[in-house]
Image (cartoon, rainbow, N blue to C red):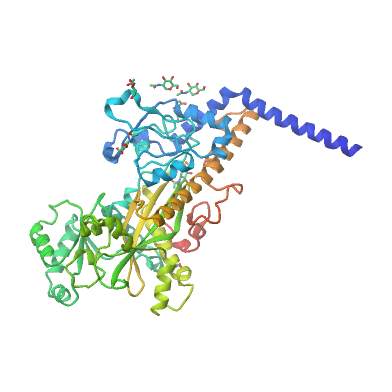
Amino acid sequence: MTQQILLASLFILFLQKWLIENTLVYKQYDQVKDILKQMNNLTTSNFYNNRKYFSNKRSFRFDLSKSQIQLNETYCNQSDTFKFYHPDIVLKDIYTTRETDDLTQEIVKSISFIKIPNYTKDKQQNKTALPEALTIPFNYYDSYLTRSNTGLSAMCLFQKHNHMRGRQQLAYKNELLNNYYQYVDKLKTMPQICSQNVTYIPKSYRLWLKDECLAFFELINTPEYQQKFQKHGPQFISKLGLEVHRGAGITMLFEKETKQLIKEYQNGQNCGQISKYVIAQKYINNPFLFKGHKIEFRIYFIIASTYPLIVYAYDSSLIRRCAMPFDKFSLEKSSHVCNTAIVKKKLEGQDLQEDQSFFIEWKLDYLQELLLQKKAIKNKKWLNDYLYPKIHNTIQHLIMSTQHYFDNDSKLSEFFGVDFMITDDLQIYVLEVNSNPQLLKTTPGRILQNTQLVNDIIEIQVAYLRSKYVRLRSLIKRILSSKSTLQKFDKEFKEAYKDKLEPEFPISSNNLFRKIIDKNLKDSKAYNDMIQTKCIL
Ligand SMILES: *[C@@H]1O[C@H](CO)[C@@H](O)[C@H](O)[C@H]1NC(C)=O
Ligand SMILES: *[C@@H]1O[C@H](CO)[C@@H](O)[C@H](O)[C@H]1NC(C)=O
Ligand SMILES: *[C@@H]1O[C@H](CO)[C@@H](O)[C@H](O)[C@H]1NC(C)=O
Ligand SMILES: *[C@@H]1O[C@H](CO)[C@@H](O)[C@H](O)[C@H]1NC(C)=O
Ligand SMILES: *[C@@H]1O[C@H](CO)[C@@H](O)[C@H](O)[C@H]1NC(C)=O
Ligand SMILES: *[C@@H]1O[C@H](CO)[C@@H](O)[C@H](O)[C@H]1NC(C)=O
Ligand SMILES: *[C@@H]1O[C@H](CO)[C@@H](O)[C@H](O)[C@H]1NC(C)=O
């Protein structure tokens, strides 16, 4: 009897508490709205604030920003409030958008998609407003970064955006190289072991820098260089910097091409006067061969957050082979450079079918099998013991060398694909890093694979957003029930705003992304113990 009374009163107490909490929240609609607005404001004063950069147009490539939407400064106010009172929008549903007509759009459409119609100049009046329910914009262009007002007209508290500033520091070949050499220099002041793994870019000369340009022309005029050239074929390739990808801008320095370069730079006399971003890079002429062809593989990775820095790398990879058989003396560019764009050129129109034969496999397991067959390796767990750690460690270094350019905000993220080559002695080199990597739909297998890839990315975006939503929501309730102000909870806000998975939102075990950096963890733990604490910048 007493037990029942106790239970009943407990239940009533619980009910009362629940009622008070929730009716309070509803009664306090205006306060909730105000706190949300202040939170958005706090993020722009303490985290990413694109308004600061508006005047400095050179920080952005405006031509890349295609705006299809009518931006409205009341948007975040409305959207966040709407989501606060309809938790299912964030916790149960997913609302995505994508503005380009591509495979990624087809994929995100199948999730839960809000179509924002095409915008053309003459229909300006008809630009669509951003939908309130939008949680996971998955755009190709970064127009929200450049055209909106963070926390007002886009990029609100309860959204996870798929772009960030600073991605060019990885994706532009000239910047990647600058950052690599700066990093190498910094590591020289640290314990020697720290430099051990930072060898993933072949020796390069930046021809826009006078000293390196002079050094390069001096080198190619030596008898040693001539000898090596005769004995081993091309010694260098040249690459163009900035936004040039998929094999474009890459020149094998065969004899004719070398002469052209010498002429353009007047054998070095023009060094310092030509500011074009041309890189002369040592050509790695001992590639691992697949049926006589050079191969390369692409590893996808995402920077899931920049507050704190969290990075995942994908387990499945795209292995491709070069169009023509490899021969270090071959004068065919497509025997040395395997990019699809070049392959297309080579085959003039037949690229769709042929693409399939250049594409070898999805899984690096295949490479391991091949190596086991060839008796190049003995360890049946080589992939997990050697190659994956090496790949992950390389991506960690790529990030470490560029991270100071990233904005610090849990709203931001970015998706990359990094191309590696592998040598006959199983060393790996980074060829290039692509942001917005192209996801092709050339074969059913590829569509399937890319569909899982995009779904896996979105699962991660959603898990972090839901975790943050729950934390911020409970913080808002605490502020309301203590009749306090957000200012008094500044520290708590910064903590709740930090991206971190809550136990109720785990990433599913069949998601192929693996976490390789998480700065929620301390020291070398942040890098899966693959970078020693004393080596962390
Ligand atoms: C946002 O915060 C700044 C201070 O960081 C303050 O000056 C400004 O008035 C706030 N804006 C709004 C709309 O609350
Ligand atoms: C990011 O912002 C938070 C809050 O302002 C700050 O504590 C932290 O040091 C910043 N991190 C970086 C890497 O700038
Ligand atoms: C912004 O949105 C509000 C609310 O929907 C609306 O009243 C207002 O007219 C909009 N402003 C513009 C410039 O479209
Ligand atoms: C946001 O909502 C608050 C509270 O309703 C309101 O006072 C404020 O004017 C709104 N801000 C904007 C920019 O619409
Ligand atoms: C949108 O634009 C793309 C290319 O710009 C075009 O292919 C597509 O048909 C357009 N869609 C609509 C609904 O107008
Ligand atoms: C919007 O588009 C529709 C159909 O394309 C057109 O009939 C209408 O006049 C447009 N409205 C404005 C304000 O341009
Ligand atoms: C070098 O990379 C391997 C993974 O390939 C890693 O296990 C090792 O800790 C790294 N060494 C240093 C000094 O960072």
> Total number of numbered labels?
0
Asked whether residue 285 appears in the rendered view, the answer is: yes
**Residue 420's quadrant in the figure?**
bottom left
Closer to the camera in the image, 207 or 1: 1
Asked whether residue 309 appears in the rendered view, the answer is: no
Residue 363 in picture, x, y percent from top left: 43, 64
Q: Is residue 31 left or right of residue 278?
A: right
Ligand 5 is located in which of the four quadrants? top left
Residue 445 in picture, x, y percent from top left: 41, 57
Q: Is residue 249 left or right of residue 400?
A: left
**Relative to 256, is 505 above or below?**
above
Q: Quadrant of the N terminus?
A: top right
**Residue 252's quadrant in the figure?**
bottom left
Q: Residue at x 12, y 60 (%)?
A: 261
**Relative to 211, is 405 above or below?**
above
Residue 189 in picture, x, y percent from top left: 36, 62
